Amino acid sequence: MENKTLEFRFGKAGKYIPLIIAVIFIVIAGTHQSNVNGYCLAFFAAIVIGAPFAKNMSAYGEAALRGLTRPIFGIISVAVILAAVNGKLVSGSGLINTLASLVIRSHLGGGIFAAISFLICCLLSMSTGTSVGTNVVSFPVLFPIGVLAGVNPGVMAGALVSGALFGDNLAPISDTTIASANTQGADMGGVVRTRVWYSIPAAVLSFIAILIFGGSGQSAADASSLAFNARSLLMILVPVIVIVCCLLKQNLIVSLSIGTLAGIVLGCVSGLYKLSDIFSYPGGWKVGGLFIDAITGTAGTVFMLFGAFMMLGIMQESGVIEEISAFLTNLAKGPKSTEAITGLSIGIMGWITGVVAVGMVALGDVIAQLGEKYGVNKYRRANLMDCAGLSLAALAPWTVHTVLPASLANGSAEVAITPMTIATHNFYCIILLIIMAIAIITGFGSKNNPDNKK
């Protein structure tokens, strides 16, 4: 962790001014159903307003910029852009209308299609271990088809996000699974075996909820009105190629780049696109084509990520994150309160940093010490960190788990999906959080320790 060199006026309270300003604007954005621009405004307003309160404004600016040096910032930002390009190539080819026509004719609309899409995302996220990667692959294809096939847009988005987070929570190759297990000294096999007692029931109940609330299947369009172009089916290879690359453990940015190149080649060779449809220089200081249109369409999301990571740098170097984590861990007074604080602290750190695994690494040692002190075994701690902590973080309307899906949804279909819509329809995390609360209160699973069976 970096040295805390950033000091503010008004003593210790001064360092919380940027965070308080951000929270105020975030609440306003959430209560007014703002799109991603509302959250972008929240972070930049907090950064600007907080600057005069720093004793050393040069150090303040440098701390903000250091927040942008985190590798995860570059990965997510570039992934958002390349995913948008992939999505434009797929949607512009006519593939969505072609597949939607087939789904409607097969009477698989409404909740049935949403539930099937949830299972597809569960399998994909379990295979790749990444919810971000699953979202960028699934949304451009499955979301618009679901909307056209009569699925409630909020439920459709929630189904895809829920499936993506299932693997993020349970897959042995997920960064949160690895971080929660390693920081607590628990073997991966034991963590996964004990976690299924929470994750599988949550997934089953999510599947049922999606099936029920997905919609009647009354399609938004008549199948006969949707243009059917058999050649467009070639473009389904674009997400398939990205998925295969991810399964082969290829870098996400490289996987998306390969998918983009494949989409351009397939689109042009098949006659679905002319090269000028993708890259266009009409003159008059203008640039056109779907490639640049996709890039500019992600501006709000990317700028929001800029603001969020700059805020993270400021809070990191001013000591805010360290103080919040210390306050939360000091609340632990016994086994149940330790369990509650374990999940809550990781969730709050996820709210602040936007990256759950960062919070797990930052608080892992403290949580391990508290668990040993109050008799909470390492597998229980790892599961509380990932199940409760990840669920809390994923339900915040300014983290990547809500902002990215909202951006992808709005870019692939003509509907208004906000980050708050994603949060309120994320059945998996809502149900998993309830299960974990019941587990803490009743003690369910607290004695489940694979080490005792060896």
Image: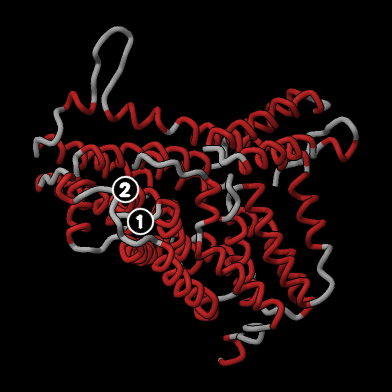
Contact between labelled residues 2 and 1, with CB atoms less than 8 Å apart: no
Q: Compared to 184, does 64 lie above or below?
A: above
Asked whether the viewer can see residue 173, the reply is no
Horizontally, residue 319 falls left or right of residue 452, namely right
Q: Which quarter shows the C terminus?
A: bottom right
Q: Compared to 388, does 251 lie above or below?
A: above
Q: Where residue 321 appears, x then y in whole percent?
A: 74, 48
Q: Which mark is residue 144?
A: 2
Amino acid, disc 1: Val
Q: Residue at x 40, y 42 (%)?
A: 415
Quadrant for residue 69, please give it: top right
Q: CA distance from mark 1 to mark 2?
A: 10 Å
Residue position for label 1: 151
Quadrant for residue 411, please give it: top left
State the residue in front, 214 or 96: 214
Asked whether the viewer can see residue 134, the reply is yes
Q: Residue at x 87, y 30 (%)?
A: 9
Q: Residue at x 68, y 63 (%)?
A: 364
Q: Where residue 328 appears, x then y in whole percent?
A: 78, 59
Quadrant for residue 112, please give it: bottom left
Q: Residue at x 62, y 62 (%)?
A: 389
Callout 2 environment at 10 Å: few (<14), some (14 to 19), or many (20+)?
Answer: many
Callout 1 environment at 10 Å: few (<14), some (14 to 19), or many (20+)?
Answer: many
Q: Residue furthest top?
A: 284
Indicate the secondary structure of the residue bearing disc 2. Answer: helix
Horizontally, residue 164 falls left or right of residue 449, namely left
Q: Where residue 296 appears, x then y in whole percent?
A: 40, 27
Amino acid, disc 2: Pro
Q: Where residue 77 appears, x then y in whole percent?
A: 47, 38
Horizontally, residue 73 falls left or right of residue 111, namely right
